[in-house]
């Protein structure tokens, strides 16, 4: 399912650059005349500069059932509506294309302790005020990354453990779409599905979030962690059966290994290990138990449809 940098994301309701996880879509809430868009901040909490690469999610190629108009969505890093400000005086935030001709992926070098803030634009839609939808997927590297080598797989010299991502889908409930089948909910998570190279955290403000914080650990510690998709746990509670993002990927160097060919969730449910066909080594995906309290699952924090406002604060807290 993965393409290009092959990120894995839980926000399939807003469609796809090759996203593995899925979140249920609530029914659309009635539009209101006055809306407040959700915004995003990204903070480099380390004492060194870091490259933040942004991958923008793309709309579906065909409209979902009962969705006559997808509304407006920012799809390119060159879009004039994709405006970030910096906490560093006089510094302009601009994402450099990952490679020539690439419009969906770009990187920006953040200074130590720098904060960048996405400033949503608004437009008139009928009697309401709307804002373009955006799906943000951020990963972090010590050097600029042009997509080569390994295309998201683990096991390379450059990225022996691939990378994890902070993901956020915002303002689909106020982007001018039409129809009960259109995506309409803010949602966010940390995806370790491909691998883990960084300690990331989320802090959420505004109403309607089932939980308002998330942070990932190293391999073997992310199952049942709220707001986190563990390694190879493509749908939170199950696995595709191979190292992500593709069946021919090498496992991350530090992927958790199966003990005596057995894997269990924190709640004690057994599941099949992943076998690397080149080595016959068996690994355990970081599969979570089903949630009894969060209808969208433990791995994603998703608001009711049409609820916006507040901030999704993404923090880079250093490399692992």
Image: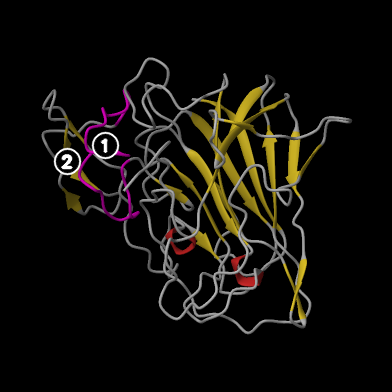
Q: What is the residue that sits farthest to the right in this orientation?
A: 89
Q: Which mark is residue 252?
A: none
Q: CA distance from mark 1 to mark 2?
A: 11 Å
Task: Identify which residue, 197 or 145, lies in the foreground.
Answer: 145
Task: Give the SS element for disc 2.
Answer: loop
Q: In the image, which residues are magenta?
A: 232-255
Residue 107 x %, y % = 61, 31
Q: Residue at x 62, y 54 (%)?
A: 74
Task: Give the SS element for disc 1.
Answer: loop
Q: Is residue 215 visible?
A: no
Q: Residue at x 77, y 51 (%)?
A: 119
Task: Identify which residue, 264 or 25, lies in the foreground.
Answer: 25
Identify the residue position indicated by label 1 in the image.
243
Does residue 199 appear left or right of residue 122 in this picture? left
Q: For the residue carrying disc 2, how many other residues have a C-alpha within 10 Å: few (<14), some (14-19), or many (20+)?
A: many
- The answer to which quarter of the image holds residue 221 is top left
Q: What is the residue that sits farthest to the front in this orientation?
A: 101
Identify the residue position indicated by label 2 in the image.
273
């Amino acid at each position: 399912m993965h393409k290009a940098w092959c990120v894995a994301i839980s926000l399939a309701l807003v469609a796809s650059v090759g996203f593995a996880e899925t979140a249920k879509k609530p029914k659309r809430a009635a539009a209101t005349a006055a809306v407040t868009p959700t915004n995003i901040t990204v903070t480099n909490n380390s004492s060194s500069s870091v490259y933040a690469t942004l991958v923008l999610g793309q709309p579906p190629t065909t409209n979902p059932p009962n969705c006559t108009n997808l509304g407006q969505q920012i799809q390119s890093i060159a879009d004039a509506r994709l405006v970030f400000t910096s906490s560093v005086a006089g510094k302009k935030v601009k994402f450099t294309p990952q490679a020539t001709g690439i419009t969906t992926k770009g990187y920006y070098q953040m200074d130590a302790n720098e904060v960048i803030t996405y400033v949503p634009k608004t437009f008139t839609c009928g009697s309401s005020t709307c804002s373009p939808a955006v799906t943000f997927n951020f990963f972090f590297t010590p050097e600029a990354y042009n997509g080569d080598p390994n295309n998201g797989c683990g096991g390379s010299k450059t990225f022996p453990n691939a990378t994890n991502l902070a993901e956020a889908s915002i303002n689909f409930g106020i982007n001018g779409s039409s129809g009960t089948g259109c995506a309409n909910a803010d949602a966010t998570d940390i995806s370790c599905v491909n691998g883990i190279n960084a300690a990331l955290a989320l802090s959420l403000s505004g109403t309607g979030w089932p939980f308002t914080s998330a942070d990932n650990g190293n391999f073997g510690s992310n199952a049942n962690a709220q707001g986190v998709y563990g390694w190879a746990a493509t749908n939170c509670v199950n696995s595709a059966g191979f190292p992500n993002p593709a069946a021919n990927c090498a496992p991350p160097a530090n992927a958790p290994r199966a003990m005596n060919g057995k894997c269990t969730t924190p709640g004690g449910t057994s599941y099949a290990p992943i076998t690397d066909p080149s080595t016959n080594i068996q690994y355990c995906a970081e599969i979570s138990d089903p949630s009894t309290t969060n209808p969208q699952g433990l791995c994603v924090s998703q608001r009711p449809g049409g609820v916006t406002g507040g901030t999704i604060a993404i923090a880079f807290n250093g490399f692992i």
